[in-house]
Amino acid sequence: MGENKSFLRLPRHIVPKNLGLRQIPTNPLPLLQKMDLSDWLCGLDEVTGKVISSFGLLRQEDLHFKPEPARWSIAENLAHLIVVNNTYFSIIREIREKTYKLPFLGKIPFLAGFLGSVLQEYVRPDQNEAKVKTFPIWEPARYVPETAILEDFEKHQQALRDLRILSEDLITTGQVIASPANPHIVYTLKDAFEVILLHEQRHLLQASAVLHQLCKTPL
């Protein structure tokens, strides 16, 4: 007998094609360990430390080395993280200023929790790297450098760390937001921060793979 699977087919306007989530098993997803504030901060600090220790001594040309045209360099991976994370800063600012407008889908009780779990599963760093085209607003090309990329990344990580600490009250009350890239994808702010951290861990692995390729490239 074949494996019995039940699926929920999500409408195209809710889950974009490039997420690869059109059909999602309705069986419970594997439970991901929920992080409290201290867990999250430790995870973020670990990413920051590994970025600096792994890439801190590389030359600029090494940071921008691309193993192949379609793959991002180390610098592009880091720039992408800065660009993605910055889009959440403005959302939280709008919530504080009481100007944030939550889409109707965000008011459906089960949907935010469900999509948050799906996104965490999707970006988990232990998943096989999927060749997915990122949303245009999150392209590395949108990164505007202030100093060198590693300095900017370290500064950004500190700002992100502060933002997570200052957002604890919103997380405690279960604040729901929409994805900065697609208003039809909604999840809790707590899940958003967990997705941010998992996404950073995933791109750290991708950047480390580029470094491995760089080390094998003849001078």
Image (cartoon, rainbow, N blue to C red):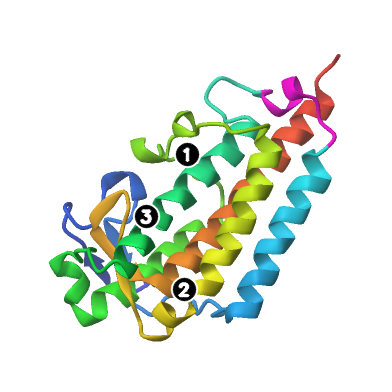
Residue type highlighted by circle 1 = Lys
Q: Position of residue 102 (x, y in %)?
A: 20, 66
Q: Earlier in the sequence, mark 2 or mark 3?
A: 3
Residue pointed to by mark 2? 167
Which region of the structure is painted magenta?
57-65
Residue 89 lies left or right of residue 108; in this view the side is right
User: What residue would you read off at disc 1?
Assistant: 131
Q: Earlier in the sequence, mark 3 or mark 1?
A: 3
Q: Is residue 124 visible?
A: no
Question: x, y percentage for residue 115?
Answer: 33, 68
Nearer to me, 146 or 65: 146
Residue 206 point in image, percent of width and height: 64, 42
Instruction: Mark yes or no: residue 61 visible.
Output: yes
Task: Count residues near mark 1 (Cα–Cα under 10 Å), then give few for <14, some for 14-19, many for 20+.
Answer: few
Residue drawn at point x = 65 percent, y = 79 percent: 38
Residue for badge 3? 90
The residue at 70%/70% (across/down) is: 42
Q: Measure the alpha-carbon separation of dots 2 and 1.
A: 32 Å
Location of the N terminus by quadrant is: bottom left
